Structures are given as C-alpha cells and as structure tokens.
Amino acid sequence: MSVAGLSGLPQVAESALPAAVRTGSAKDKEAYKAALGFEQVLLGQLVKSMASDGPLAEGPYAAPVQDALSSGLIANGGLGLATDLYRALTQRTSSAGTGKERA
C-alpha cells in the first residue's frame, strides 16, 4: 500500500507515532502517518464546525488558532481514530496477500 498520492494530508512528526510503529517497517510508518493525517483532517473540520458560533469563527486569527488546536490534539494522541484506521489498513493489506480478510 502506498499513500504517496495523498500529499494533501498534513505532515506527521515521527514523535507522534507509537513506539511499535516507530520501530516497525517503513510501510508501517507510512500507513500510520496516513491514518494520523486523516484523523487530523477530520479534527480540523470538527474544530472549524465547533468554532463557527464562537469568537474564533471569523477574523485574522480564526484559521491559525483552529489549526493549532487540531494540531495540538493530534500531537497529544488525538481521538484514537488513527490507531483503529491503522489496524484496518494493515489487516487489509496483510490479508490481501492471502485472499482473506481478518475480523
């Protein structure tokens, strides 16, 4: 599996990866970074939606503050969605070679 075509996802620091992924293969790192980047995009949309009724809805600092909030959430573990996405991605790719999907 390659996520090279997903250049629109935010960059993810190595320090944000779990220890098991950091010591894993390059493919593991790539899959987890894609999952974490996707979670960050979703969190960004959630933060933007939540801020639409408050003081951070408009103004010159609205977007940077919203981005900082979603980045901070991801840097501190996010919502846990990336871990589930990573498991699903790795199960799908490992079962693709056998023709079976794991439960």
Image (cartoon, helix red, strand yellow):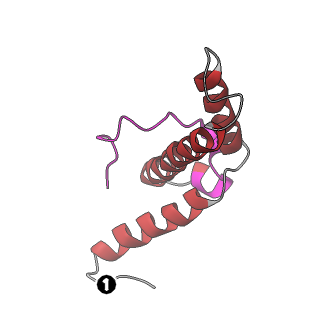
Front-lying residue, 22 or 36:
36
Residue 13's place in the image compared with 62, above or below, is below
Q: Position of residue 8 (x, y in %)?
A: 38, 35
For disc 1, the neighbor class at 10 Å (few under 14, some 14 to 19, many from 20) is few
Look at 61% across and 14% down and name the residue there: 60
Note whether residue 23 is visible: no
Give the residue at mark 1.
100
Q: Residue at x 65, y 53 (%)?
A: 18
41 left or right, relative to 56: left
Q: Quadrant of residue 4?
A: top left
Seen from the viewer's position, the closer of residues 44 and 23 is 44
x%, y% of residue 83? 58, 61
- Asked if residue 7 lies in the magenta stretch, the reply is yes
Segment tinted magenta in the rendering: 1-21
The vertical placement of 1 against 99, above or below, is: above
x then y, percent, for residue 100: 31, 84
Q: Position of residue 39 (x, y in %)?
A: 54, 50
Q: Amino acid at mark 1?
A: Lys
Magenta segment includes 5: yes
